[in-house]
Amino acid sequence: MRIRTSYPTSLSSTVALLALTLAAPATAQVAETWLRATPIEALGPWPSSRLLAMGDMRLAADDRTYRFNSFDYGANPAGLLGARDTSWVEQGSEYSDFNNEYYGQSHSAVLRRSGFRGALDGARNWALGAEFVYSTLVSSRHDEFTTQDNARFIRDFDIPFAASSQPITGDRTFGAGVRYPALSLTYARRFRSWLTLGARFGYREESEDRRLLDPYDLDASAVATEYSGGASARLPGPLKRATFSAFGRYVSNKVTARSESPLNDDEYAWSRPEVGYGAQIVVRSGIVRAVIDGRHRSYDGEQIARVNWAPQFFLNPFPSETDPSFVFRRRWSSFLSGFRHNEGSTLWSVDIPGTPARLGMEYAVYRDYQWIRPNPLVFQMSLPLDVRRLGYRAGGGVALDLPDGGGTVATEVRMARDFRDDLTGALPDIATSTISYHFGGEYRVLTRLQLRGGAVFLRQDPDRRDGLPPNKGIQLTAGAGYFWDALDAQIELAAAHEHFRFTPLDPSREIGYGDRLILTLTRLF
Amino acid sequence: MVRRNMTRAGILIVLIGASVLSCGERTPTEPDLNNRLIAAPASERFENSPQRESRELLIDGRPTDIEWNIAGDPTVVLLKGTNGGGGGDYYISVRATWSYNAVTSDSVALYLLVQWADPSEDRQEQPLVTSVDWQDDDGNSLIDCSTNDAILRPENWTRSPLHEDQVVVEIFSDDTGAYPADQWRWGAGTTDPITPVNATEFQGSVTDGDNFGSETHPSAGLAEDFFNNGSGWVRDAASPTLHPYMLESNFVPGSSVPIFLADKGSRDTRLNRGKPVPYVIWRYVARPLGVCDSLSPIRVDDSSVRDKTWNPGDTTPSFIHGFPDSAEQFSQADVLARSSYEAGKWALELRRLLEPRRPDVNGVRSPPRPDDVVLLPGHTYGFRITVYNATKTLGSASSIIPLYIKPRS
């Protein structure tokens, strides 16, 4: 999962953080590509409906999705044992949509997903976690490269995209529907009082139905199988409040594009196995909790094309005569690809002594390099890509607990920047920036009922170098939590709505809006 | 201390190595498509059919296995819009051979066969479109040409945006694209129909001279010929006469009113000497458009249409076609080209002398023309082909690939 900061809403940094806690295979894939440049996250785990309802808090207010452990923060399977102190199960459903008309280029996406996750705790000596999520999305995008918004969608399109046999004289709308079920199993066991080992198996399958106004129809699918192993060790002596965790991961990742008709049967198989590794230091002392994380992941890959065109097929250059010698049957290497990602991040939460207040801070920096180099001699099956990205995010906030457990009020500010250096020269260097100011709170109306609300003020600049002021937006959030005795479970509901304006042309004109609904049901044992 | 440093260095090396760790492919594992064009030698008259009869490779747009198998497997070349102005990306098939005289062993000509897919056959190049309606549906005349010159008024004629399919072949002096270079332009509507007229069928062609080449390549059309010595493309030399080139505009500059219409002349019985009326006006039998020209040639040539007069939307070609004057003496008619279109595929045959020159005089060989690239067996040249699919500018071009004139072994 690449951490990006170019999303045009405040959710950008949220999803970036959530992306760190993946339970399913983590390689960027078909679904993520179709949601690129939207605030909707394709592969993240269940977002916290509580924090979303409180103004999309992440730093100041604490929640289960942001706990200071290597499982939730760093996807280290060994960290599952320390993630919670009891068995638990959670069911969640999410609906997200996003519509945007920045510079007249209308984009839209809708995501629906639902699933279960949970873990069995074996007397603090072992834990077994499982997750199954079924997601669908529909996305409609534009494919013109030389747009004023610097082709924000198509510029990083990194799944198969065939060249057109027809002249392309302008913008085309194209889209896709994607279904992608994913599951994972995680097991962690304590082998020594100071040492825990863990392993995870993950599987995800994506199938795409692409809509493209081109006679050469193409649909992509992807299968990713993850094998992860990790270890977590409590440090000795004066460092005993800290744990050191490390993990390694291998993801078998195959993206296959197919084009089938009565006159052709083509397959483009792209294998790009990914390796990743990382380490975390987690500190939990009396008033300080912190995570320091470093990680790397990379892949190299090659796409092999196998085309089989009948003589009557419109791309076959040979005569349209039923003659076996006129069948165009070839096999070739379409392109080579690669990806390198390095990232370091830290997250801190400090209780202010003698007060009911708490400070939260984060900082993260990443650098990645990605390339797709099509073979110039054969039919192009991907857009060329040669890009370097450097970005960081930072934020801080404060939360104040109300007396007698009456609730919490919090505020925080987050910012993220991303520098994109296009080595192909197709686009100028682009620097995106997002700043968001969050205000929200939770009020315990009854013992079992909490009401939440918040507001987020957004500043998103698609390119800081273009001299134009940023887009401005606001997000309103609301939600409730209820503990239902009959089920012995906590029910959470959150809703968010946001909209954007673009100042220079018409300050009052809305250029984008989005909605989000999350419902979760959690039971602890 | 030494061991500790060694350990640290070892850890550092492992970390640096791991930072570039990956297990995917980094180099292509499949062989590339053959991207080299080899012209195999063949006798100008060859025998490779089962019946062993004498054959000749004819430029007639009808490639047969008997003719072209001698060239070997075709080379499949990718054309890209990014190379040619924004057209689509697709493959073409190219075959090449060169011929020699079986008696004298002199090299003769280079032959090319280009085949590609195209969903539509486009042969009209910006035809002139009229808005004149000469008769109503009941056959009553709406225009009295003694008082109404509607057919000659500029406001009643426009130029259609339709374009023909075109191919441009460039031959460079070497495979890096060095100059001098030759360029041959074939147009489905402009150059393809410039074929010799059979003197038996049209006796007037002997006098008019449009039976040029009918005894050597009776079905071959022509391609325009350009030359570039490094300072830009210019037309090959042409006769300083009334008709130096094969194409002439059929409209007055600044206007879209046609100057000529297709006709059958005074000696023939068939309109336009059998040339397709929708996109050809054969210069030798054309006649000027007159104020009382009520008949639309494309309707006259179409027996399925009852109303033969001008109707809105009727077209007439925007060029008049013919052989360049003194074609043998000058370089304009060096390149023979003829195509066919069938079931969504074009097939285009081209031929040019390896060493273009004027006809021999008294048995003495003339020198090579100075405005053509001489092709020699054993040498490698640069070859680039551009296809324009019903467009003037949005072409699709190959990169410059090697063209090897394979010598006789």
Image (cartoon, coloured by chain):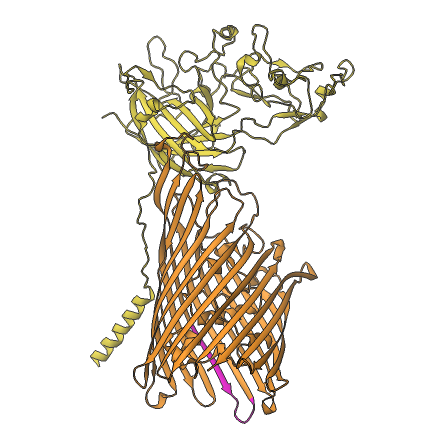
* Closest to the observer, B227 or A15: A15
Image height of A493 relative to A163, above or below: below
The quadrant of the picture occupied by the C terminus of chain B is top left
Q: Residue at x 66, y 28 (%)?
A: B158
Q: Is residue A338 left or right of residue B41?
A: right
Letter of the chain shown yellow in the rendering: B
Query: Residue A181: x and y, percent?
Result: 45, 62
Image height of B70 relative to A34, above or below: above
Residue A5 seen: no
Specify the principal SS of the magenta part. strand
Q: Residue at x 59, y 81 (%)?
A: A410
User: Looking at this rendering, what residue extends furthest in the front direction?
Assistant: A486
User: Looking at this rendering, what residue extends furthest in the bottom direction?
Assistant: A354
The quadrant of the picture occupied by the N terminus of chain B is bottom left
Query: Residue B327: x and y, percent?
Result: 46, 15
* Range of residues picked out in magenta: A344-356
* Closest to the observer, B380 or B129: B129
Query: Residue A212: x and y, percent?
Result: 52, 47
What's the colour of chain A in the image? orange
Task: Look at the image and say whether residue A371 sits in the magenta stretch.
Answer: no
